[in-house]
Image (cartoon, rainbow, N blue to C red):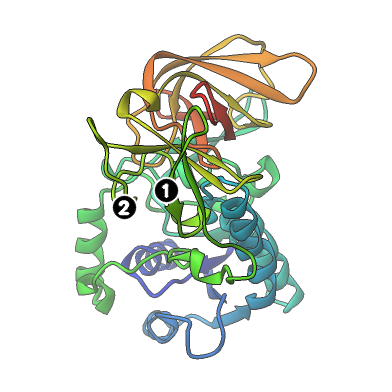
Amino acid sequence: MKIAVGLSGGVDSSVAAYLLKKQGHDIIGVRMNLFPEGQNTDEDDAQKVADYLGIPFHTISLEKEYREKVIGYMKSEYLSGRTPNPCIICNRYIKFGLFLHKVFEAGLDFDMFATGHYAMLSKDESTGRYCLRKGLHSDKDQAYFLSILTQEQLSKILFPLGEMEKSDVKKIADQAGLFTAGKKESQDLCSGDYRKYISPDESGPGNFVDRDGRILGRHKGIENYTIGQRRGLGLSSPGEPYYVVGLDGDSGNVIIGYNSDLLSSSMTVGEINWGALEKPDLPLKVQAKIRYRDEGVEAVIREKTGEDRYLVEFSKERRAVTPGQLAVFYDKDLVLGAAFIEASDISGN
């Protein structure tokens, strides 16, 4: 089988390529460059990995597309009072979308695309659905970041490291003589402070207000705050500490309250990207995560009539449910679906 492997220059992708080549597959290394020349970190390391493994290596420039799709999305979300997750958007529309189209356009034919993500993927022959699961690596649920990939995208992907622990991957890299075995773990290509792309013309100071609308002070731009934030507010509270409990993109107000104001018993999410299940009957009991590092709680998904939105009721109150972040729904380790959070039952959200 001819497999294109996304080489980042790190240990995970290099071991994925090594294992697939060892299995006898025809491997090509590919990498997307998202930034201007000279700013694409680890590109040289990706080339070194390909050279060491004796496989072809190609880079595809997606700088323009990345700025339009990911940075444009990020700016729009911040300025509307939401907290974006650019890695999620990058995965769906760039890394597993436009990137693969560009690879084909460059004449690099392949059957499957593999990455070093810690996630597992299988096909349910009874339903024809591709089922995404958490990887066995206990500290990384990378299925979370892949949960809005489409069924068509999943049908073309391999995750060779899904059933491995990080320590095992490093051991294989060391035994294979890969220099990445001792390399410090690099940041994701999509990581970084995206607020630097927002110009002074697009944002500016506004008011801190309490939940009754009383002005408490001035802030330096709505994009600098997120739900649940306590530090950096510059406000003195007469009693318990102040927290950001809401962001109003229309007025530019940052809504201030107390820790108890951050608790939600339910949230509203947008269109659900159903994974293992084609749109199931509702209500549906799930395990719901409201952010990447969240442990998740039992919840029930209920459809809201008259609009393509869903009400999710938690079994116990959740803190700092944040519009713009991704909610992912599981049955144990199986990804059932995912949707962006639109609102919680906190007043002001």
Residue 150 visible in the snapshot: yes
x then y, percent, for residue 140: 32, 46
x then y, percent, for residue 69: 68, 62
Q: Separation of disc 1 and disc 2 at Cα?
A: 9 Å
Secondary structure under tag 2 reads: loop
Q: Amino acid at mark 1?
A: Gly
Rendering quarter of residue 125: top right
Q: Residues within 10 Å of mark 1 (few under 14, many from 20)?
A: some
Q: Residues within 10 Å of mark 2 (few under 14, many from 20)?
A: few
Seen in the image, is 169 located left or right of residue 153? left
Residue lying farthest right?
306
The quarter of the picture where the N terminus appears is bottom right
x then y, percent, for residue 152: 70, 45
- Residue drawn at x 36%, y 84% as measured from the top left: 52
In the foreground, 74 or 69: 74
- Residue drawn at x 70%, y 15% as measured from the top left: 304
Q: Amino acid at mark 2?
A: Gly
In the foreground, 241 or 278: 241
Rendering quarter of residue 126: top right
Seen in the image, is 177 located left or right of residue 47? left
Q: How many numbered marks, from 0 up? A: 2
Tags 1 and 2 in contact by the CB under 8 Å rule? Answer: yes
The quarter of the picture where the C terminus appears is top right
Q: Earlier in the sequence, mark 1 or mark 2?
A: 1
Image position of 69 with respect to 34: above or below: above
Picture disc at residue 234: 2
Residue 338 visible in the snapshot: no
Residue, disc 1: 217
